[in-house]
Amino acid sequence: VSGVVAAATPKVSTDSDPQAQFGTYKTYYWAMQPQGNSPLMAQRIVDGVNARLQAKGWQLGAKGDVAVAAHVTTQEKQSLDTFYSGGALGGWGWRGGFGGGMATTQVQTNEEGTLIIDMFDSRTQKAIWRGTATGAVSSKADKMDTEIDKSLDKMFAAFPRQRERQVPVIA
């Protein structure tokens, strides 16, 4: 967890089992906490998830209705930026040839992180919910805190996903 999900706009998605009975879940426990280089960032993720679940009325315990697991991965991403200079008409000569311009290409290497929060019904051991956040990683701890919070806020904004209630049609 050297630098977890940190982008100005992290890409966040969630998914849930439509058969899961979220109304019956009241307690949870950590089956797997995030691992990595920074135990401080891992603890911030755990604290952030705990705060959001407890705000929904769930209670943390040694065992519970739901097992929570967090995973963090990072990988380097490269992008190419090419800049053109000189040349007539945007680089193309009037006779159709490339006219005297120069192209410079720079390779940008950025670290991208992904945070995954999985939840399982501890009785059936079936997956019931997944939240994923992906974005560029910052090396600054205060920026990481902000981005972890943004990612978790987006993940848990509609947690648990509520099914639409069927309203009987009166004829």
Image: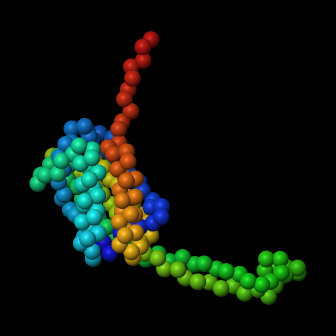
Instruction: Pick out the residue farthest to the right.
Output: 95
Q: Nearer the viewer, residue 52 or 85?
A: 52
Q: Quadrant of residue 23?
A: top left
Q: Residue furthest left?
A: 62
Where residue 5 appears, x then y in whole percent?
39, 66
Out of 46 and 65, give the one closest to the viewer.
46
Q: Say which of 18 and 22 sits in front.
A: 22
Q: Residue at x 25, y 59 (%)?
A: 47
Please name the residue shown 29% across and 51% down the image.
Answer: 52
Which residue is drawn at the image coordinates 38% and 63% (left, top)?
146
Residue 86 location, quadrant: bottom right
- Residue under the point 71% across and 81% down: 84
* Image location (x, y in percent) of residue 43: 24, 66
Answer with the quarter of the image where residue 35 lies. Answer: bottom left
Residue 114, horizontal then vertical, whole percent: 37, 65
Q: State the count of labels.
A: 0
Say which quadrant the C terminus sits in: top left
